[in-house]
Image (cartoon, rainbow, N blue to C red):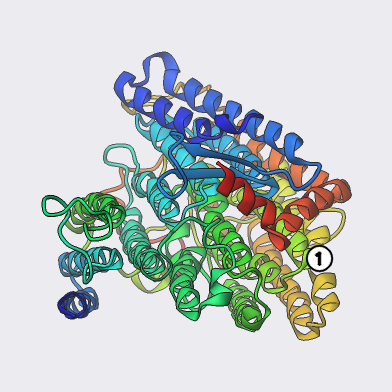
């Protein structure tokens, strides 16, 4: 793929969104366009992956062909391409769930998701810190809308409450981010990642300024102790939106942390202990929070915090093995978490939403949903033959390889707690007979008759098949992730490509 | 120095307002904070050693750095948009932002998008197989506790 085409990842969804706002939804046009544009996005990013799979080639393009320092550079290496492919596919699956669950009938659903996609793709592609801030905001603004999107008179108060928390926290983090970018500009005279390459190791003023940026990104990634917003907002959005956000929002911050630490800090060893401590604590606090929750989606939201610790551990174990494991974990987690949110969402749409223990015995009534949930849960825990096993094994091995035995032990123990809380959801929701209170909920429908139509489970099922494929074909994906990790260990190709534009 | 002091005052005021409970006060706090940060961006362009943007000498070494001004314009637009949205959220919904479901006993239902057959954007009942759960309108059921009296 020619580098000149990179801006199209942003331009096409954005134009489609604008057109849809004007045209509305005659004969399902917006749903067709939504799925069509996202499909093209996936195909294009897979093309990018196959183009870049052989090694350190990096595509870079200066938007508008302005000279270096003025232009906004877009660059794609293997990591970018992988992220584009994975999140594009995830958005497509979530949009499909949105169509099936009727949320896509809302007039502004499709345009909002398309703007979100444009912002996300831009944030992945840009090699400029200020532009990263702009694209993160481009991504967040439609998200704010998606949180409170509801049919007239059917909105829930909790949606507004969660939107308030979500917007204030993200606005605060963005404000800190832009202040950090300003400080970087003040001390380094540029916000271009390539020009900043290695500067943090030479000049401690730059290191502090970039640290402010990294702090703001950690808030957006929900690293303990700034994780509380995630567990208090994700459970209260619609199922489609929760699944979509779980795959996109924290991931863009994680991606930026990987990229910035690799390029600007050059993977400096002296700061790695900060990451090791913070991310280990994140793993533990997240999983303990999940054990205490009484609602399926809240359990999953706390697990997200825990898993973010695992993913970021890759960057704290800076080295080819650690980064490969971290990138693999990132891809695995995106798929599995969205699958869990979608299957739980299907249950909520079919049976309403109640604390755990009120809707029980779903294994007999909804065998397909139960199997999908169980498989994804086991993948999250890290059992073979699913991708979670490959991800956790390679991460633990990388930790041993770097001599971080304590961290490896934490990762293993946290897995056991993950299993515990997953079995809690499984036992209370899927096993057993319907309780009296649940019968009341289930009301007039016959006890054996399923209430979740197959199309509603299909998106989660597809994601489960993907995690199985990643697990069985882990070797292939690990190879691709290793190429991406090499690009981070040695960012020279990336830097040169951006400078040359 | 004047810019640094102004930023300090604005950020302090912003943090103070944001720590208060009312949503509108939080929004005002954000306005202060955003102004403070915008000043940081302008100061990053070397406001102490450079002149004004237009007029004066055209020497690029002494006129104001245009890049932070472009940054600040973008940042202003974004914070303006988000502030409007925050104000909308401030007048929508409750005075209380407690998310502790177990304590408040608030409804836990998922925002639903599948309408009952009688709804305005009605979905043919057979399109999705079993008919979607019939829930009463959200406003009347807002305070309904989950069945069984728990939690």
x, y (%) of residue A441? 49, 50
Residue A399 horizontal/vertical position (percent): 79, 75
- Residue, far bottom: A406
Which residue is disc 1 drawn over? A321
- Comparing A66 with A206, the one in front is A66
Residue drawn 28% across the image and 54% down it: B75
Looking at the picture, tell me which residue is in the foreground, A298 or A336. A336
Q: Picture coordinates of residue A329 (x, y %)?
A: 72, 59
Q: Quadrant of the C terminus of chain A?
A: top right
Q: Quadrant of the N terminus of chain A?
A: top right
Q: Dividing the picture into quarters, in which one does residue A433 lie?
A: bottom right
The answer for which chain carries disc 1 is: A
Q: Position of residue A258 (x, y in %)?
A: 61, 62
- Say which residue appears at 43% left-offset and 18% top-offset: A29
Q: Quadrant of residue A109?
A: top left
Q: Residues within 10 Å of mark 1 (few under 14, many from 20)?
A: many
Judge by depth and name the residue closer to the eye, A382 or B9. Answer: B9
User: In this rendering, is residue A68 above or below A458?
Assistant: below
Disc 1 is placed on an element classified as: helix
Q: Is residue A351 left or right of residue A53?
A: left
Q: Residue at x 33, y 51 (%)?
A: A156
Say left or right for A19 vs A397: left
In the image, A175 versus B19, the foreground residue is: A175
Q: Is residue B95 visible?
A: no
């Amino acid at each position: 793929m020619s580098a000149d085409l990179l801006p199209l990842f942003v331009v096409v969804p954005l134009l489609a969104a604008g057109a849809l706002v004007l045209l509305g939804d005659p004969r399902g046009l917006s749903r067709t366009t939504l799925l069509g544009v996202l499909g093209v996005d996936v195909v294009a990013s897979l093309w990018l992956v196959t183009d870049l799979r052989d090694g350190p080639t990096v595509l870079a393009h200066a938007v508008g062909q302005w000279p270096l320092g003025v232009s906004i550079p877009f660059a794609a290496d293997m990591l970018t391409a992988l992220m584009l492919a994975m999140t594009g596919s995830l958005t497509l699956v979530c949009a499909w769930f949105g169509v099936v669950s009727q949320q896509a009938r809302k007039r502004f659903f499709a345009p909002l998701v398309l703007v979100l996609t444009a912002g996300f793709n831009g944030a992945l592609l840009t090699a400029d810190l200020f532009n990263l801030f702009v694209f993160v905001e481009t991504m967040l603004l439609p998200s704010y809308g998606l949180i409170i999107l509801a049919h007239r008179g059917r909105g829930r108060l909790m949606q507004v409450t969660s939107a308030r928390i979500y917007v204030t926290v993200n606005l605060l983090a963005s404000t800190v981010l832009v202040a950090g970018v300003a400080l970087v500009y003040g001390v380094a005279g540029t916000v271009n990642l390539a020009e900043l390459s290695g500067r943090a190791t030479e000049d401690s003023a730059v290191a502090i300024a970039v640290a402010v940026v990294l702090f703001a990104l950690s808030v957006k990634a929900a690293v303990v102790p700034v994780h509380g917003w995630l567990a208090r907002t994700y459970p209260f959005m619609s199922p489609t939106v929760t699944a979509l956000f779980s795959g996109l929002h924290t991931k863009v911050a994680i991606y930026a942390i990987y990229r910035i630490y690799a390029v600007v800090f050059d993977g400096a060893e002296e700061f790695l202990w900060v990451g090791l401590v913070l991310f280990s604590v994140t793993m533990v606090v997240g999983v303990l929070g999940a054990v205490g929750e009484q609602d399926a989606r809240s359990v999953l939201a706390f697990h997200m915090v825990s898993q973010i610790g695992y993913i970021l551990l890759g960057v704290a174990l800076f080295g080819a093995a650690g980064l490969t494991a971290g990138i693999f974990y990132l891809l695995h987690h995106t798929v599995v978490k969205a699958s869990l949110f979608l299957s739980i969402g299907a249950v909520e749409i079919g049976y309403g939403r109640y604390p755990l223990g009120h809707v029980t015995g779903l294994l007999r009534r909804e065998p397909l949903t139960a199997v999908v949930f169980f498989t994804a849960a086991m993948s999250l825990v890290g059992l073979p033959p699913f991708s979670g096993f490959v991800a956790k094994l390679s991460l633990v091995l990388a930790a041993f390889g770097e001599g971080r035995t304590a961290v490896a032990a934490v990762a293993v123990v946290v897995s056991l707690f993950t299993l515990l809380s997953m079995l809690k959801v499984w036992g209370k929701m899927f096993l057993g007979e319907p309780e009296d209170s649940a019968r009341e909920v289930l009301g007039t429908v016959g006890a054996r008759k399923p209430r979740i139509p197959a199309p509603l489970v299909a998106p989660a099922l597809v994601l489960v098949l993907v995690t199985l494929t990643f697990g069985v074909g882990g070797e292939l994906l690990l190879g691709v992730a290793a190429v991406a990790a090499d690009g981070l260990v040695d960012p020279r190709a990336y830097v040169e490509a951006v400078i040359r534009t | 120095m004047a810019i640094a002091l102004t930023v300090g005052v604005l950020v302090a005021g912003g943090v103070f307002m944001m720590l208060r409970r009312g949503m509108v006060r939080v929004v005002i706090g954000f306005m202060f904070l955003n102004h403070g940060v915008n000043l940081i961006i302008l100061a990053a362009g070397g406001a102490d050693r450079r002149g004004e943007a237009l007029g004066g000498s055209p020497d690029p070494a002494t006129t104001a750095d245009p890049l932070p001004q472009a940054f600040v314009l973008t940042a202003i637009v974004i914070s303006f948009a988000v502030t409007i949205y925050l104000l909308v959220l401030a007048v929508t919904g409750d005075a209380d932002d407690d998310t502790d479901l177990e304590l408040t006993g608030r409804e836990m239902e998922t925002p639903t998008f599948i309408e009952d057959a009688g709804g305005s954007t009605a979905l043919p009942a057979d399109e999705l197989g079993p008919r979607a759960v019939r829930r009463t309108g959200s406003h009347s059921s807002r305070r309904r506790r989950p069945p069984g009296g728990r939690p």
